[in-house]
Image (cartoon, coloured by chain):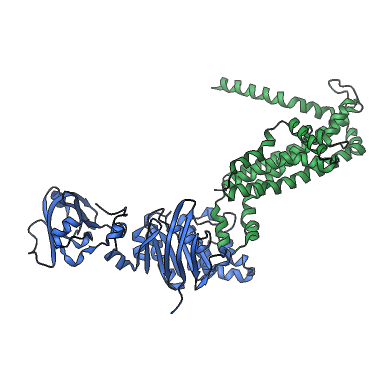
Chain colours: A green, B blue
């Protein structure tokens, strides 16, 4: 008994280490006193890179762009995703299953395909690259995430709740506000957080739709080519990790907690 | 002439090629407890949903208190529904659920509260206001659903098999309670059920549905005692159908009739002398079912006809199993025979054989 457990435990640890040592290294070298070389162990630890990163105009510009893009793409995704999910849930129409598939397809599609497709579409339409072209690129997969979450929640919501609300005198808006929205709220929060996290660290689609602007992941990628002040890159990478992990953890916790009460 | 509370005027509902309701007309009076009784798929729930406004009729009109509401949305109609699955809002407390109708109509919180308490008291749920629906039993949820409808003081309440999910004992208790609440508040109740016993003991009048049509409308006594056709006879209560051939031998009239099991007397010895006012036949007991208060016998009187007879267990009936296989004499009053209208006897499904 014990021995078998030991084997399992060892392999679990091996997998965890394999997955997370690279991230730990990024974390560790965000504090190193060396500016370009990597020696192990680091000759000394310092917090100065955090200050330097914070004062770096490029970093701040990229951070602000990434946050604005992620927030905008998330809002668009929640609105469109909820509307699509509601349509598929409430009505039976020709091509209903196909709509589900086509909404979710961008997640399955390789980012590079989405990126190329968007780039061709953008240049065909002679649309200048801007904040909005990045947002549109991110919205493609963010909508799918929002849709999936909301649709799953709606499937577990009885239609008779909406009928009861209308029956008791509520108009369409009141029914949405007082009955449907509270029902799907956990799905909106979870879907929104996941969409935000994915948008925030997205790089492939962004390379095709960004023009000259740099989101945070693109800034990291481009600064790897210039190995000056590498610890700054590590600091920024660490920040991206934190900003994407926190929402994902919250989102999973949220969906797990509501599982039992939705009945 | 006073206008009816609910009127369906020649209403038809089609879902694609399926005709769910086929030319139904009925009038429900103010303050009436009216049941729509029928097997599943007979169109009774669709009729209820058309009164509520969840479905629009394909043809025909729906009137509430003389006003044509055919084109109105559910929230524009002064009716409230108690749903089969209760449809309580799971994220709201009992208090909030019951107050919902007032809230969306703009009644202030301070005005709502006493009315909510009053409605909860009416269904004996005072003190449960802070619970969530998930913390209530089936019977309690049922009461919340009723209170949520009653509080709006609608002129009609629609109930869609509201007791279907409750166990037998609770059902009986709720039947009595529903009826007494209805009597107290004086609101018209339209009640959908497939349970004939429920329809008989609660309704002022009932409509028997079959295949999207109404087979018979009337008070429970007349529907039970004088079923118009074989379907009604078979669906409402247990019924013995005697086909034309045997009927001619018994009554001299070659028309099929039904006779209720409790109207037939069973004699192990000779029956009292037959005369023109009685029907007499003998047969073999092919089944004996002891049911506590009474015993049910199946007596084969012809190769294609078995009559069911119910006998109260006045004496200790333990020996009656001994009647199995015995030849017995049956006698009943000729007035107990209900002749069936020929037309609808052909498309019947539920007649006892």
- Residue A100, image x and y in percent? 62, 41
- For the N terminus of chain B, the quadrant is bottom left
Q: In this view, does A253 lie to the left or right of B173?
A: right
**Image position of A114 with respect to B327: above or below:** above
In the foreground, A161 or A130: A130
- Horizontal and vertical percent position of residue B3: 46, 76
Q: Which of B121 and B160 is in front in this view?
A: B160
Please report the residue visible at 61 percent of the width from the left and 51 percent of the height from the top. A183
**Rendered view: A7 above or below A199:** above
Can residue B331 be spotted in the picture?
no
Quadrant in the rendering for residue B347: bottom left
Side of B112 relative to B139 (left or right): right
Residue lying at 7% horizontally and 64% vertically, measured from the top left: B273
Nearer the observer, B115 or B193: B193
Q: Which residue is drawn at 68% across and 40% down?
A: A144
| Residue A120 visible, this angle | yes
- Total number of numbered discs in the rendering: 0
Q: Position of residue A157 (x, y in %)?
A: 57, 50
Looking at the image, which residue sits at the far bottom?
Answer: B1
Image vertical order of residue B89 relative to residue B206, above or below: above
Residue B72, percent across and down? 57, 65
B276 relative position to A74: left or right: left
């Amino acid at each position: 008994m014990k021995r078998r457990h030991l084997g399992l435990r060892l392999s679990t640890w091996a997998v965890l280490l394999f997955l997370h040592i690279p991230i730990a290294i990024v974390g560790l070298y965000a504090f190193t006193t060396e500016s370009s070389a990597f020696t192990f162990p680091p000759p000394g630890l310092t917090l100065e890179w955090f200050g330097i990163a914070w004062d770096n105009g490029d970093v701040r510009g990229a951070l602000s762009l990434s946050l604005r893009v992620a927030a905008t793409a998330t809002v668009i995704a929640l609105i469109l995703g909820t509307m699509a999910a509601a349509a598929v849930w409430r009505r039976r129409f020709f091509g209903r299953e196909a709509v589900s598939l086509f909404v979710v397809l961008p997640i399955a599609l390789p980012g590079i395909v989405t990126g190329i497709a968007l780039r061709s579409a953008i240049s065909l339409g002679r649309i200048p690259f801007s904040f909005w072209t990045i947002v549109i690129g991110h919205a493609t997969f963010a909508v799918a995430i929002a849709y999936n979450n909301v649709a799953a929640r709606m499937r577990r919501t009885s239609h008779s709740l909406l009928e009861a609300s209308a029956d008791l005198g509520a108009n369409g808006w009141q029914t949405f506000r007082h009955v449907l929205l509270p029902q799907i709220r956990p799905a909106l929060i979870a879907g929104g957080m996941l969409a935000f996290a994915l948008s925030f660290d997205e790089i492939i689609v962004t390379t095709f739709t960004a023009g000259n602007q740099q989101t945070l992941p693109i800034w990291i990628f481009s600064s790897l080519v210039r190995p000056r002040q590498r610890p700054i890159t590590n600091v920024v990478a660490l920040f991206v990790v934190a900003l994407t992990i926190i929402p994902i953890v919250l989102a999973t916790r949220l969906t797990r907690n509501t599982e039992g009460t939705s009945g | 002439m006073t206008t009816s509370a609910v009127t369906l005027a020649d209403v038809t509902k089609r879902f694609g090629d399926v005709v769910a309701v086929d030319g139904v007309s009925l009038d429900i009076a103010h303050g009436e407890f009216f049941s729509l009784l029928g097997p599943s798929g007979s169109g009774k729930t669709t009729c209820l949903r058309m009164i509520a406004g969840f479905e629009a009729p394909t043809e025909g009109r729906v009137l509430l208190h003389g006003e044509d509401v055919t084109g109105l949305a559910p929230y524009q109609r002064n009716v409230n529904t108690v749903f089969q699955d209760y449809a309580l809002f799971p994220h709201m407390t009992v208090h909030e659920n019951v107050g919902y109708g007032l809230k969306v109509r703009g009644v202030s919180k301070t005005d709502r509260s006493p009315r909510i308490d009053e409605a909860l008291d009416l269904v004996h749920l005072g003190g449960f206001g802070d619970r969530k629906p998930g913390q209530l039993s089936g019977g309690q949820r049922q009461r919340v659903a009723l209170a949520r409808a009653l509080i709006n003081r609608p002129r009609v309440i629609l109930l869609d098999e509201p007791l279907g999910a409750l166990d037998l004992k609770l059902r009986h208790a709720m039947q009595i309670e529903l009826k007494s609440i209805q009597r107290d508040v004086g609101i018209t109740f339209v009640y959908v059920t497939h349970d004939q016993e429920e329809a008989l003991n609660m309704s002022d009048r009932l409509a028997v549905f079959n295949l999207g049509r109404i087979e018979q409308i009337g008070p429970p006594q007349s529907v039970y005692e004088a079923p118009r056709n074989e379907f009604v006879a078979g669906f409402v209560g247990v019924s013995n159908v005697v086909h034309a051939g045997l009927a001619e031998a018994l009554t001299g009239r070659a028309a099929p009739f039904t006779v209720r099991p409790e109207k037939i007397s069973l004699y192990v010895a000779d029956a009292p002398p037959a005369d023109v006012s009685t029907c007499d036949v003998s047969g073999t007991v092919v089944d004996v079912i002891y049911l506590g208060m009474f015993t049910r016998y199946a007596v084969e009187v012809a190769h294609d006809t078995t009559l069911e007879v119910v006998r109260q267990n006045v004496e200790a009936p333990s020996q009656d199993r001994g009647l199995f296989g015995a030849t017995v004499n049956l006698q009943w009053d000729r007035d107990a025979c209900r002749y069936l209208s020929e037309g609808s006897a052909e498309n019947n499904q539920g007649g006892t054989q």
